[in-house]
Image: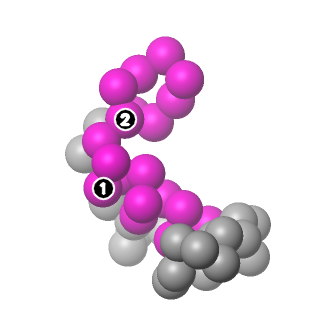
Amino acid sequence: MSWLKLKNVIGTSYRVDPNDLVNTKRALSQLGYYNIPAHRGR
């Protein structure tokens, strides 16, 4: 998945960059592993 670039590690023991979180959720959604809630938009 070379198109997904994160600034930092994502995990419960780390501070998560908000943009990294959004990008990860968007990528997972495109792969069919995460459903973005309707009130959040795409």
**Total tally of numbered discs in the picture:** 2
The residue that mark 1 highlights is 19
Percent coordinates x, y for residue 37 in the rendering: 66, 70
Residue found at the far front of this picture: 39
Query: Up-down: is 27 above or below 7?
Result: below
Q: Residue furthest top?
A: 13
User: Residue 30 versus residue 41: which sits nearer the camera?
Assistant: 41
Q: Residue at x 33, y 48 (%)?
A: 18
Mark 2 secondary-structure assignment:
loop
x and y percentages locating residue 40 in the rendered image: 53, 72
- At a point 41% along the width and 22% down the height, the residue shown is 14
Q: Nearer the viewer, residue 39 or 19?
A: 39
Tell me how far mark 1 sits from mark 2, CA to CA: 9 Å
- Residue topped by disc 2: 16
- Residue type, numbered disc 1: Asn
Can the viewer see residue 20? yes
On screen, residue 40 versus residue 16, left or right, reads right
Amino acid identity at mark 2: Val
Q: Is residue 8 left or right of residue 31?
A: left
- Which of these two is toward me, 1 or 14? 14
The span shown in magenta is 9-29
Q: Is residue 22 left or right of residue 17?
A: right
SS type, badge 1: helix
